[in-house]
Amino acid sequence: QVQLVESGGGLVQPGGSLRLSCAASRSISSTNTMGWYRQAPGKEREMVATITSGGSTNYADSVKGRFTMSRDNGKNTMTLQMNSLKPEDTGVYYCRLRFIGTLVDYWGQGTQVTVSS
């Protein structure tokens, strides 16, 4: 098992930036895919960005060119750098990981991001 803890959310004006972090309680070097997801009020949770164990990234069209996901296996963390934020980026952001050879997804508790003037 693993515990994931997100941090870095908050209130930011449109056009601003935030950096989200997700810390894992154990080594993440064997993870298959890790990802960031978000859920806006009244909407389903959606994929924001994913990264494979090899470092290949995939982004939702709505965040391409503005968000950057990275992972640090040595520190057991993954981050999401969010630039040029828009009000529609508002939501609760969750990190997720799945270990190689399993079908179990682990989720963090979420961190609130609010983009508003």
Image (spheres, rainbow, N blue to C red):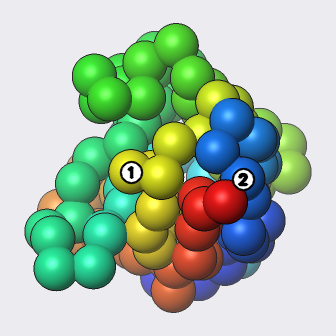
Residue 10, above or below 36:
below
- Give the side of residue 97 with respect to residue 116, left or right: left
Assign the C terminus to one quadrant of the image. bottom right
Q: Residue at x 23, y 54 (%)?
A: 46
Real-space Cα distance between discs 1 and 2? Answer: 12 Å
Residue 73 badge: none
Place of residue 25 in the rendered image (x, y in percent of width and height, measured from the top left): 71, 76
Q: Nearer the viewer, residue 117 or 50?
A: 117
Disc marking residue 88? 1
Mark 1 is on which residue type? Answer: Glu
Q: In the rendered image of this protein, does residue 44 appear above or below residue 82?
A: below
Task: List x then y, in percent, for residue 90.
Answer: 46, 62
Is mark 1 in CB contact (under 8 Å) with mark 2?
no
Residue at (32%, 29%) from the top-left corner? 62
Disc 1 element: helix
Can you give x and y, in whole percent of width and height, for residue 84 in the image? Answer: 64, 30
What residue sits 46% from the left and 73% below the top?
92
Is residue 51 visible in the rendered image? The answer is yes
Badge count: 2
- Tell me the tag on residue 13: 2
Local secondary structure at mark 2: loop
- The amino acid type, in three-letter code, at marker 2 is Gln
Q: Nearer the viewer, residue 87 or 79?
A: 87
Residue 94 coordinates in the image, percent (x, y): 46, 68
For the point 37% across and 42% down, the residue is: 48
Q: Residue furthest front?
A: 117
Graded by Cα atoms within 10 Å as few (under 14), some (14 to 19) or many (20 or more), the crowding at tag 1 reads few
Seen from the viewer's position, the closer of residues 109 and 9 is: 9
